[in-house]
Image (cartoon, rainbow, N blue to C red):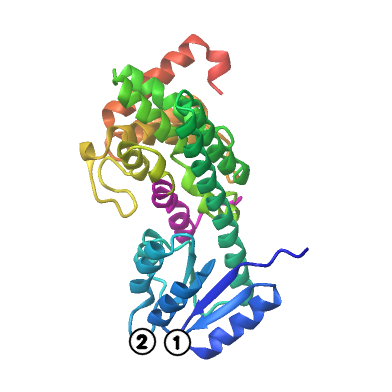
Amino acid sequence: MTIPKESILLVDDEEGIRCILSKGLEMRGYVCDEAENGDEALAKLGKHPSDLVIMDINMPGKMGSEVLPDITTRFPETSVIMASGVTDTKVIAKCIQDGAQDYISKPFRFEQILSSVNGTLDKRRVALEIQRYFQDLGKKIDTNQSEPRRLFLGAIQTLVNTLEARDTYTKDHSQAVAEIALTLGAKMNLGAGEMDDLRWAALLHDVGKIAVDPNILNKPSELTTTEYRHIMTHAIIGPNLVKPFVNDKVVEIISHHHDHYDGGGLDQKIVGKDIPLGARIIGVADAYHAMISDRPYRKALSKMDAIEEIQWYSGSQFDPIIANIMINTVKQQVLQSPKNNNN
């Protein structure tokens, strides 16, 4: 029995573009429909929701960027790829923030479209599997009130394992960041509730990378500005993914874990102590573990070199108080076991 391919709605006011994409995608087994503007797209989705929408930004009537929030709100299981000749990174970031899974610049090659379609639908399948897992989890909790913590922990581990299977770097990274963050939290005398929020946020801080292109995640050279922006969308996607299953404090921590203390982070809106404390702690823990880990484009730094970097960016990227606790903690570890730790 042949499993049918997903359905795709092509939204563009240029009939020639719709025709080329439709023929090419149908040859690959996808089921395609077309709409020439945003209103027609919404009407068609209302009758028969598609698995994926490929939509131009600049169209007569409603702009594609205006239609996008309607699609993501009304049809949450429909993925969206935006297409446009506009390459402004702020426009791209806004589309991703409003729920688009990818953004393709015109003029494009069909191979580029096909790669984006395949990747986006792969991510959609993973996201739907995770949603179903949590729905099943909720049913089990309803019928077995004595095991919610164990079941929730299992769900968290599923999310983390799914992410780590896609990115060689993140293997054990989330667990390591959680351990470092909790060490810092304990030294800062956080309460039990704050420590619990910190634990879940640290374990889930990178889960949005499920929706990031694995070729970019594992790129063996330094990232371009566009690639960096693409990866940083995980701080938007991740909170939206876990929001139904964790409290608002955990969501806020994950949303802001890449904010810089001085406000210099990408598209950052809050500064200093307005950044959630948990996010500031995870920011230091995440950066430290990243520096002492091998990356495709560089070897790991020694622990002492890593804390020199933490010191250098204290007060700018990092909360100076938390940075100082991190530095003193590592120095103490190195002094206690120099042969095992200073490498």
247 in magenta: no
Q: Quadrant of the C terminus?
A: top right
**Disc on the earlier residue, 2 or 1:** 1
Q: Position of residue 216 (x, y in %)?
A: 56, 54
- Side (left or right) of 24 relative to 173: right
What secondary structure is marked by label 2? loop
Q: Position of residue 218 (x, y in %)?
A: 60, 49
Dot 2 amino acid type: Pro
**Residue marked by disc 1:** 13
Dot 1 amino acid type: Asp
233 in magenta: yes
For the residue carrying disc 1, how many other residues have a C-alpha within 10 Å: few (<14), some (14-19), or many (20+)?
some
Residue at image location 55% in from the left, 77% down from the top: 108
Residue at image location 65% in from the left, 83% down from the top: 23
Q: Nearer the viewer, residue 292 or 49?
A: 49
Q: Position of residue 247 (x, y in %)?
A: 34, 37
Residue 111 seen by the camera: yes
**Residue marked by disc 2:** 60
Q: Position of residue 138 (x, y in %)?
A: 47, 38
Residue interval drawn in magenta? 219-240
State the image quarter where residue 18 is shown: bottom right
